[in-house]
Image (tube, rainbow, N blue to C red):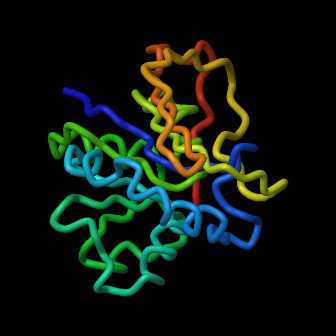
């Protein structure tokens, strides 16, 4: 049995998840007014979290007391992070081994977090749903949520909701597809 994966993320209206220097103050300052945007309810359904090294290091920067993953399995995709870097995580060198490990653990619902990791999951056809909270701001540049794809990824809109304070939340189901060309699954985040 294979897991399902749901992306839950905030973006600027112009599609960025962070500035080039990784700053997300433009999102957090506006998000404080809007509340958790449904994150706690979503996170209660998650069995495991997958993230890239940069996202993992960002989480560490929030302090040990803010490690909010509890006893959920946390997989980190990195070609440079030492394998035993942190007893709370499992480091994987490539997406194939990460996916195989999640399947072997019998994980039902995965939360892929971090721009490059999300892009890798999309290219591999491993995203089932997207929940995108759009902040009422244009930042003009930075790290995009979506990168290049080998082909179109068809989506079915489940809902579009006004969350207040200028935020809109879009929920999409990814139409199941198999890449017609072999996906070049990179090691992803370093």
Residue 163 relative to residue 23: left or right: left
Q: Quadrant of residue 180?
A: top right
- Measured from the top left, where is residue 85 in percent x and y? 37, 80
- Measured from the top left, where is residue 99 in percent x and y? 35, 42
- Of the 4 image quadrants, the one containing the C terminus is bottom right
Q: Identify which residue, 141 or 81, lies in the foreground.
A: 141
- Measured from the top left, where is residue 176 in percent x and y? 44, 14
Q: Reply above or below: 66 against 27.
A: below
Q: Reply above or below: 83 against 37.
A: below
Q: Residue furthest front?
A: 165
| Image point (47%, 83%), residue name | 61
Residue 183 relative to residue 158: left or right: right
- Measured from the top left, where is residue 72 in percent x and y? 20, 59
| Image point (45%, 23%), residue name | 159
Q: Identify which residue, 170 or 46, lies in the foreground.
A: 170
| Image point (73%, 64%), residue name | 19
- Of the 4 image quadrants, the one containing the N terminus is top left
Q: Identify which residue, 83 or 137, lies in the foreground.
A: 137
Q: Residue furthest right?
A: 140
Residue 117 relative to residue 66: left or right: right
């Amino acid at each position: 049995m294979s897991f399902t994966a749901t992306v839950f993320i905030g973006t600027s209206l112009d599609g960025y998840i962070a500035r080039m220097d990784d700053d997300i103050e433009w999102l957090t300052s506006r998000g404080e007014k809007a509340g958790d945007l449904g994150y706690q309810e979503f996170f209660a359904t998650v069995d495991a979290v997958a993230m890239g090294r940069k996202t993992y290091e960002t989480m560490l920067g929030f302090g040990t007391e803010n490690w909010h993953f509890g006893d959920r399995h946390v997989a980190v995709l990195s070609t440079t992070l030492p394998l035993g870097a942190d007893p709370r995580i499992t480091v994987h060198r490539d997406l194939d081994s990460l996916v195989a490990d999640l399947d072997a653990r019998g994980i039902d619902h995965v939360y892929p977090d971090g721009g490059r990791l999300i892009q890798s999951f999309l290219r591999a056809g491993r995203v089932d749903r997207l929940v995108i909270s759009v902040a009422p701001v244009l930042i003009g540049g930075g790290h995009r949520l979506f990168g290049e794809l080998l082909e179109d990824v068809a989506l079915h809109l489940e809902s579009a909701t006004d969350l207040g304070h200028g935020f809109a939340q879009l929920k999409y189901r990814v139409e199941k597809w198999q890449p017609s060309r072999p996906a070049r699954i990179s090691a992803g985040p370093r």
